[in-house]
Amino acid sequence: MKRREALRWLGTSSGLVLLSSCGGGDDGGALVDAADTTDALVLPDGAVCAATRNDVLGPFHREGAPSRMMIASATEPGDRIALGGIVYADDCTTPLAGAALDIWQADATGAYHEPNAGEPFRLRGKVDAAADGTWAVDTIKPGNYRNGPGWRPAHIHFIVAHPGYRTVTTQLYFAGDPYLPPNDSCTSCGSDDAARVIPLVARAGGGFTGDFRIVLARA
Ligand SMILES: [Fe+2]
């Protein structure tokens, strides 16, 4: 990836993200660490390299998801996404080999599925970043879902961890979603963070690709 491209996706915002419940809706519930006080790194050309910001954990994270690249099974309904990226250290350059990603999401109708014997960890899984920091999963585009009186933009949840760095609990959004701000019913969620709103690019033969690069702050 070219450096200018890297700076573009990192965006220009940084600082504190205040997180709270969403008024009892589907993404209400537990708070996550909001104390992201890492100062942004200002690069020589004035662009800002910032750690990926926290977002609401929501009530649907479950421990024990299996390690697998196929977050969505081959029979899962929905538009396929080849989703991947790179996990970087807070210089936005050094890849974090072995960073652990815990990923969960709703199905194409916006429903989350509890782990059970019939559907063990449907739409949940863990992957580790490779030596060059890259990671990749095969999944589907989640649907919008109701949250209180309104709707949430489609999103995929992540917890990303690496020794010596702050674990980030975050959400990934998709450009063009009609429920992105100002229409996100979760006003305390981070869907206004441009660094986490990615385009989906149509793939020859069907489906999409998505590129989500993650930057971890030092612990
Ligand atoms: Fe969610």
Image: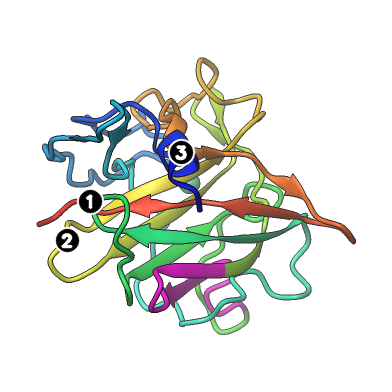
| Image-based side of 2 in relation to 187, left or right | right
Q: Which mark is residue 206?
A: none
- Residue depicted at 37% across the width and 61% down the height: 87
Answer few, some or many: residues within 10 Å of disc 1's Cα (few below 14, many 20 plus, some between 14 and 19). many
* Amino acid tagged 1: Asp
- The answer to whether the residues at label 1 and label 2 have Cβ atoms under 8 Å apart is yes
| Residue 155 point in image, percent of width and height | 54, 44
Residue under circle 3?
4
Say which label, 1 or 3, has the lower sequence index: 3
Cα distance in 3D space between marks 1 and 2? 9 Å
Name the residue carrying label 1. 90
In the rendered structure, the answer to whether residue 15 lies left or right of residue 175 reads left
Q: Secondary structure at mark 3?
A: helix
Give the quadrant of residue 105: bottom right
Nearer the observer, 102 or 37: 37
Q: Nearer the viewer, mark 1 or mark 2?
A: 1
| Residue 58 appears in the picture as rendered | no
Q: Is residue 91 left or right of residue 81?
A: left
Q: Amino acid at mark 2?
A: Tyr
- Going 87% across and 57% down the picture, which residue do you hit? 204
Disc on res. 165: 2
Asked whether the residues under the numbered discs 2 and 3 touch, taking CB atoms below 8 Å apart as contact, a structural biologist would say: no
Whether the residue carrying mark 3 lies under 8 Å from ligand 1 is answered with no
Query: What residue is at 32 percent from the left and 55 percent from the top?
Result: 93
Q: Say whether marks 1 and 3 touch (CB < 8 Å).
A: no
Q: How far, Cα to Cα, is label 1 from label 3? A: 16 Å
Label 2: how many residues lie within 10 Å, few (<14), some (14-19) or many (20+)?
Answer: some
First to last magenta residue range: 119-136
- In-image side of 147 versus 51 (left or right): right
